Image: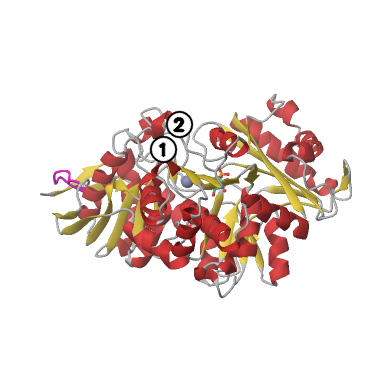
Amino acid sequence: MTVREIATTAYSDQKPGTAGLRKKVRVFAQPHYLENFVQSIFDCVPTLRGATLVIGGDGRYHNREAIQTVLAMAAANGVARAVVGQHGLLSTPAASHLIRTLDAAGGFLLTASHNPAGPDGDFGIKFNVKGGGQASETLTRQIHAQSQHIHRYVISDAAAIDIDTLGSHTVEAMQVEIIDSVEAYAELMQSLFDFEAMRAWLRQGHRICFDAMHAVTGPYARRILVEQLGARAEAVLGGVPLEDFGGGHPDPNLVYARHLADLAFGDDAPDLIAASDGDGDRNMILGRGIFISPGDSLAMLAAHLHRLPGYRSGLRGIARSMPTSRAADRVAQALNIPLHETPTGWKFFCNLLDADQITLCGEESFGTSSAHAREKDGLWAVLAWLNVLAASGSSVQQIATRHWQRFGRHYYQRHDYEDLSHEAAQAIMHQLQTRLPTLVGQSLGAWTVSQADSFTYHDPVDGSVAGDQGLRIICADEARIVVRLSGTGTQGATLRLYLERYVSPQGDLAQTPEAALAELAARARDICQLEALSGRTAPTLVT
Ligand code: G1P
Ligand code: ZN
């Protein structure tokens, strides 16, 4: 075994987005591409030397080769111990948990989340820091800058190691442990939830259906839901991880998991229907005859979490990303706890979690989690709902209806305009930003604009400031339009239009979101001059 120093030249396109570096597999497969980025991380995080590093991925195509590369480079860069999930699998929340509990100096998560996989699909790599959270904006900028100057990397020429069998190996002076991907995570879930109550609920004949979408949560769901909680084996769909996710798009929403909505609204629907995404951090929740929007899920969990063992002492605070519906704000107000509004992206929650200022956080993009991890956690959200159902004896429908009758309902939709040209996307943002000041006081259909600005976040913990985090047009409590560009896409630009309308408990709580939001959507398209500037008359995706 020898460590080699390899000369390389920088790639100009290694700027990480909202959650790490994501590109097409063919981009990652270019000579030195992955190596350059990985070395840039080692160069920027010197604390990895002599420390523990966690490595795992969502099981997508290229995962196994990438893990061998990361291992050989970790050994060459002086890492003392690498902990790798068996078969190279670790869900994002499970990896985050391991980083925390092993006191690792960081972790490499090989994932492009819910983006399709396979030779023509996407690949990604994300670095999580000590404590388990995502790299900060500052560190991300440093890594990007380093990737622009890199001219060498170091790598061991040791043979590939067997990542399929539990056990220990050495690469150079580095110890490698292949560990059970699920065990520590399952123990964490047992410490938070009432497994006995959930087992009893299932024994009473209640049914759950969870779709792992042939991605990383399969082994987690089989172990926890089936083996530990006693759900029937058929309760887990897509439980075997596949390199191409079975050709599917493991993004659990009403478009890509339409079959689950059909199940929920069909005859003989299970009591709880749920799914997670490629890397296990997102979740979708449905009940018999009802879909729970992520913003509502956050609010409803906030209202019920104190029933669950890990949360008996109540919530310290709640955080949601700015575009996420304001449903949780009402629960925070009722509980008399702070509500923090952060930019899109999980990393902004981590300071608040570390400073013990919040217990629960979530995003409209099907992400929910609590202080138990530093990532969003799909299976956690499913178990939280399962436990709430078991503890309350209510159905999903009853929980939602009672919630709306108490707090009112926030109708919510996100309209995505995908694969726009960068020019069109910039033009839309630019014209809107310029006009924002003139909108205040203007009427917007039935509503009046009370505030229109570009969102800037002032982190209350470290004082950092993040500007340009989305344009918002607010009509007091009643309606809101948010516009921003995606930071995770790999092709063209994606414009996201977020629509929210509040109806009080006395109003019509039983509309469909489409009907409730139709007028606001039309106004939003006008304000953005979408058709004139992009030629598009309708979104490509509505969630
Ligand atoms: C999207 C979601 C965001 C989420 C991120 C990573 O980012 O909108 O909430 O944190 O994926 O899963 P975007 O593409 O909007 O930048
Ligand atoms: Zn994900």
Which residue corresponds to the image point at 66% horizontal and 48% vertical from the top-left?
470
User: Is 285 included in the stretch rendered in magenta?
Assistant: no
Which residue corresponds to the image point at 68% horizontal and 27% vertical from the top-left?
534
Which residue corresponds to the image point at 14% horizontal and 46% vertical from the top-left?
158
Instruction: Give the numbered dot on residue 238.
Output: 1
Q: How many marks?
A: 2
- Whether the residues at callouts 1 and 2 have beta carbons within 8 Å, the answer is yes
Image quarter of residue 130: bottom left
- Identity of the amino acid at label 2? Gly
Q: Is residue 460 left or right of residue 64?
A: right
Pick the front one: 112 or 49: 112
* Quadrant of the frame with the C terminus: top right
The residue at the far left in this view is 1
Q: Is residue 327 left or right of residue 196?
A: right
Discs 1/2, front = 1
Crowding around mark 1 (Cα neighbors within 10 Å: few <14, some 14 to 19, many 20+) is many
Q: What x and y, as percent, mark residue 211?
A: 46, 41
Residue that badge 2 annotates: 248
User: Is 156 included in the stretch rendered in magenta?
Assistant: yes
Image quarter of residue 522: top right
Magenta stretch prevailing secondary structure:
loop
Q: Is residue 482 left or right of residue 266?
A: right
Q: Is mark 2 within 8 Å of ligand 2?
A: no
Q: Is residue 216 visible?
A: no
Pick the front one: 209 or 470: 209
Q: Is residue 132 left or right of residue 400?
A: left
Q: CA distance from mark 1 to mark 2?
A: 10 Å
> With respect to residue 41, does 527 lie above or below?
above
Residue extent of the magenta highlight: 155-162
Which residue corresponds to the image point at 64% horizontal and 39% vertical from the top-left?
496
- Identity of the amino acid at label 1? Gly
